[in-house]
């Protein structure tokens, strides 16, 4: 019997090693798997490369992971906000790396990894520092930059409901990066508000099929 549910958050993040590349879903706090991030903090993995839309907010979630110096490198679109002071301080001190990626490019690089695409040409970033060292090409008279896919060892995402096979549905805009991150990681761990019985999710409404999910854990577990 296929059962991907985990009995606890600790079990869900077990085995994440030092040096892993981890995608974390969320657009700010919307869709951020806060419970999984807290469990990762307690688990102790270090020297992580984190792929996220930003570099943390305030004192919780990703910001706490950065504050505790568990993150070696950030790949994100918005590293600086009014409350991203932990990343800002560490970056200025040379204690954390940054790979800045425009938001559309970030999403497409993640999607490309999940789709098995070796790279793609985009006009975004051409002629800027972000294009340095990358292949460029003129296509139909327009300049493009070659961007590479982003693969991950793990993805931590948040969904509204999931079943024991790993099928997921999301809550409105909390969906954001979750579906493409699930496809781009070797191991996807989904934090859900509710674990439902097989058949309780209409197959027509499934956003992330269980084939892309390896572990499911209830938030309050």
Image (cartoon, grey):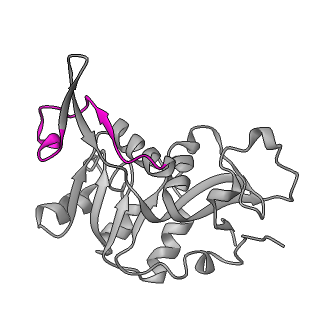
Q: The N terminus appears in which quarter of the rendering?
A: bottom right
Residue ID at (57%, 47%): 179
Quick check: 215 above or below 149?
below
- Is residue 110 on the magenta stretch? no
Residues 76 and 105: in front is: 105
- Is residue 129 on the magenta stretch? yes
Quick check: 172 above or below 5?
above
**Residue 108 appears in the rendering:** yes
Residue ID at (43%, 81%): 17
**Residue 60 appears in the rendering:** no
62 horizontally vs 133: left or right:
right
- Estimate the x, y position of residue 26 in percent, counting from the top left: 48, 50
Residue ID at (86%, 59%): 197
Chain part drawn in magenta: 116-135
Quick check: 49 above or below 210?
below
Residues 85 and 93: in front is: 93
Q: The C terminus appears in which quarter of the rendering?
A: bottom right
- Estimate the x, y position of residue 126 in percent, counting from the top left: 17, 32
User: Which image quadrant for residue 204?
Assistant: top right
User: Which image quadrant for residue 46?
Assistant: bottom left
99 horizontally vs 196: left or right:
left
- Estimate the x, y position of residue 20 in percent, counting from the top left: 39, 73
103 horizontally vs 192: left or right:
left
- Estimate the x, y position of residue 152 in percent, counting from the top left: 43, 62
Q: Main secondary structure of the magenta part?
A: loop
Residue ID at (39%, 53%): 52
Quick check: 137 above or below 153?
above
Residues 204 and 28: in front is: 204
Number of disc labels: 0
């Amino acid at each position: 019997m296929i059962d991907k549910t985990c009995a606890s958050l600790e079990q869900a993040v077990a085995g994440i090693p030092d040096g892993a590349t981890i995608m974390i879903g969320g657009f700010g706090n919307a869709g951020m798997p806060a419970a999984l991030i807290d469990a990762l903090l307690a688990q102790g993995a270090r020297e992580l490369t984190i792929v996220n839309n930003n570099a943390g907010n305030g004192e919780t979630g990703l910001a706490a992971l950065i504050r505790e110096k568990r993150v070696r490198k950030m790949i994100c679109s918005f590293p600086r906000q009014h409350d991203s002071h932990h990343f800002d301080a560490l970056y200025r001190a040379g204690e954390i790396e940054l790979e800045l990626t425009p938001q559309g490019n970030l999403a497409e690089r993640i999607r490309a990894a999940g789709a098995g695409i070796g790279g793609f040409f985009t006009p975004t970033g051409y002629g800027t520092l972000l294009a340095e060292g990358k292949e460029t090409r003129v296509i139909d008279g327009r300049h493009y930059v070659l961007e590479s896919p982003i693969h991950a060892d793990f993805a931590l995402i948040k969904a509204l409901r999931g079943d024991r096979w790993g099928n997921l549905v999301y809550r409105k805009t909390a969906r954001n990066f979750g579906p493409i991150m699930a496809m781009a990681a070797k191991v996807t761990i989904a934090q859900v508000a509710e674990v439902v019985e097989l058949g309780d999710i209409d197959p027509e409404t499934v956003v992330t099929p269980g084939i892309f999910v390896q572990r499911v854990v209830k938030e309050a577990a």
